[in-house]
Amino acid sequence: MNHLCVRILQSGVMLPLKEKDKPIVQKLLSAGCCARCVLRFCCVSVQAAYRQPQQDTLKELQDFISSAENSKSPDSAGAESTDRNNKSHDAAVSEPPEDPPSKRAKLELSATGAPSEEDAAAVVKQKDEESCVCVVCLGVLQELCGPTQAVKIAEAVKAEKYEFDTLVLSVSLPAQLCVREHSCWLHVKKELREKSVALDKDDVIQVKEAFKWIMQGLVARALGGVAVVTRSLFEVGVEFTHPETDADCHFLATTCPDCFKPTKNKQSVFTRMAVVKALEKISDAKFLKHYPCPPAQPSSSCMPRDIQCLHGSVFVAGRYNKFCRSLPQTPWVIDGERRMESSVEELIAAPLLSSFRANSFNFSSSGREDVDVRTLGNGRPFAMELLNPHRSRLSKVEMKQLQETINKSSDKIRVRDLQIVTRDAMSRMKEGEEEKTKSYTALIWTQKPIQRDDITFIDDIKDLTLDQKTPLRVLHRRALAVRQRVIHSMNTRFLDSHHFYLGLKTQAGTYIKEFVHGDFGRTVPNLCKLLKTDTDILELDVESVDVDWPPSIPE
Amino acid sequence: MDCVEQTDTEAKAPSVVDRYYTRWYRADMKGKPCEDHCVLQHSNRICVVTLADTHPILQNGRTIKSINYQISNGCSRLNNKVSGKSKRGGQFLTDFAPLCRITCTDETEYTIYSCIRGRLLEVNENILETPSLLLEKPSTEGYIAVILPKFEESKSITENLLSREEFESVVSKRTVAQSQPS
Ligand SMILES: [Zn+2]
């Protein structure tokens, strides 16, 4: 017997409540739920219903239930509030004529049973305390959401001067809201199941969802018409806390101890995730033994925390040259002490951070060179993740200018092919790393004197396979292993009786220094073996890193 | 360019050991005269244990008959295996843990010790095949073992060892003592 009882709201929205919602509405209002939470538990998914002023919704709901009460005990209801009864009658008149309210009410009453005198009294009590904080949402869907709050959020966003077209609103609620929601669900579970056996806790509209329905449009308007969407790189976070009821969750730790394992980085074990998990496990009987149903009346609303704005990372890629033999790629710190005053990543990052107005960065590159090694030729591919950029789009011309700024800032490095890339494209830099070849030039010293002819045989060596034990100089941070690496070709340029230049084309991952000095005989064969004398490496340059990413940009 | 570097191509380049390692010594190991050990500590805290040039094995044209990393019935340093970045599974050594025993053709036998506390990373298997490496290149290819001290002990492990200067002074006094009639 599902007689539709459509309420016509002032704003023209129709509350899609059916007769079977009546006991639910009645019970929830008596329990101290706010009007919007009542809509949630009636599984009303008409967004506009949440957007209208909560006082109006409350009135509609009260009229909705009193239309039935009236038919049962008109005297008591009329005596309590004549005003409301009149309104209720006005509303009833507008209902479809083929279903007169009196008849429908009678049918309903016979089907679901009349509300007790006690319930009716509670409704009346609720009417007198309309300003009460909701027992479920703790005020989040009451005073904490509306035009005033939307303006506050917009002001906070504007103050940070982000550049964005769209934003996504994220809401963080205190974990105890889940406990209160569960208590309320148990409170009306029977009535909800009578409405439809298929209804489950998941069908109840979430506080978060309702909050967004109400706030998204308001925030968008307050920000001058940006789109507030469900997916955006720009996230505006609203967080609420409610210290008064934090203890609501505590009983769960004794009933479901395995859900609340302490973790290092969390302040409290009562995270939303853990609480939700515990509530899934706990039996109804056990829950009701430990927690009031419906939840107890709080004395205060949630506290809104500072608005948190976060823009998704921007990724910038390019190639760098390093012309200096006393510049590390990344800051070099030994025993907490800085060894060199700058680094490649810092020289590149500084202008990027200021242009994109980002908070911090993560640098990655296709391999790395030692502090005393130069990188020449086309340079080494690198990518930089810029975190929380306040500006995220630069034109090609602006990127070109940014590249110039970096290059003018230092003659120790030079950058080319600077461009904005996607996060996915970044992985391509790492993918090809092992298969790619690299070219080097090394200045070699020999212990025994050499003549021009002594070294020419090296030019004929092709695809020389090395067995390299993890070099001692990196063994403290890498696993011990023997790795096979190939030197594809070499060429020599005689300098004097103790020196020559050695050019090498090698598989990526070959340790050149160890190939030259042998690393205590741990790389074999090595140049000492080939030349039958001790050899050492005095200088090393990377001539090319043959990774075809990022795409080159014509000058 | 603000960091032009001069490479004096005439000068003899410092060796790899000189450039990256600090030399530490233990003289007269366990009271046995001249059984000097050397520990090369890399700036990354890794240590390479070698014979000091003054060790009896390297004197008087001795040749090596055998090198044995089996230091007891139950323990062979050759069975040492480490895995992963954290070097799990490596044998843990204290200052006087034996690493190997070396027997010369004149039947003299010497035990080489760890000298420092740390995890054994590898022993030099090349000297088993080519013992002459130990005589020809005792401080590089003829090394005995590689040891990784605990991070927090990387400074303190060398406190009981001699610096290069201290060791050289010990050796020079030794020479004086030998040249004087007792
Ligand atoms: Zn509420």
Image: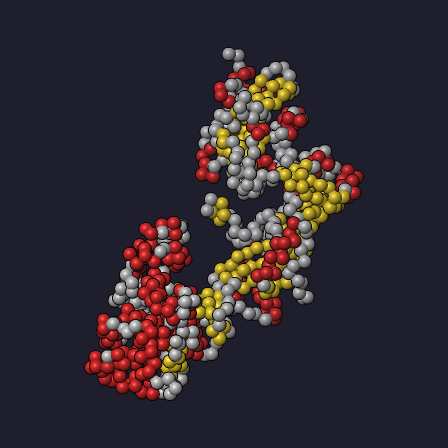
Task: Name the residue located 58 percent from the left edge and 36 percent from the top edge.
Answer: B18
Task: Name the residue located 36 percent from the left edge and 51 percent from the top edge.
Answer: A256
Q: Relative to A90, is A253 above or below?
A: above
Q: Position of residue A111 (x, y in %)?
A: 33, 74
Q: On the rendered image, what quadrant is the N terminus of chain A found in?
A: bottom left
* Front residue (pair A113, A477): A113
- Decide if residue A139 is on the left or right side of residue B41: left
Counting labels gives 0
Q: Relative to A351, is A53 above or below?
A: below
Q: Position of residue A68 (x, y in %)?
A: 30, 79
* Front residue (pair B36, B5): B36
Q: Quadrant of residue A34?
A: bottom left
Q: Quadrant of residue A473?
A: top right
Q: Position of residue A97 (x, y in %)?
A: 37, 87
Q: On the rendered image, what quadrant is the C terminus of chain A found in?
A: bottom right
* Front residue (pair A201, B77): A201
Q: How is the image coloured?
A: secondary structure
Q: Residue furthest top?
A: B182
Q: Position of residue A53 (x, y in %)?
A: 35, 79
On the question of residue B178 being in view, the answer is yes
* Front residue (pair A40, A76): A76
On the question of residue A438 being in view, the answer is no
Q: Quadrant of residue A278?
A: bottom left
- Decide if residue A442 is on the left or right side of residue A307: right
Task: Name the residue located 62 percent from the left edge and 34 percent from the top edge.
Answer: A520
Task: Name the residue located 57 percent from the left edge and 55 percent from the top edge.
Answer: A364
Q: Relative to A508, is B161 above or below?
A: above
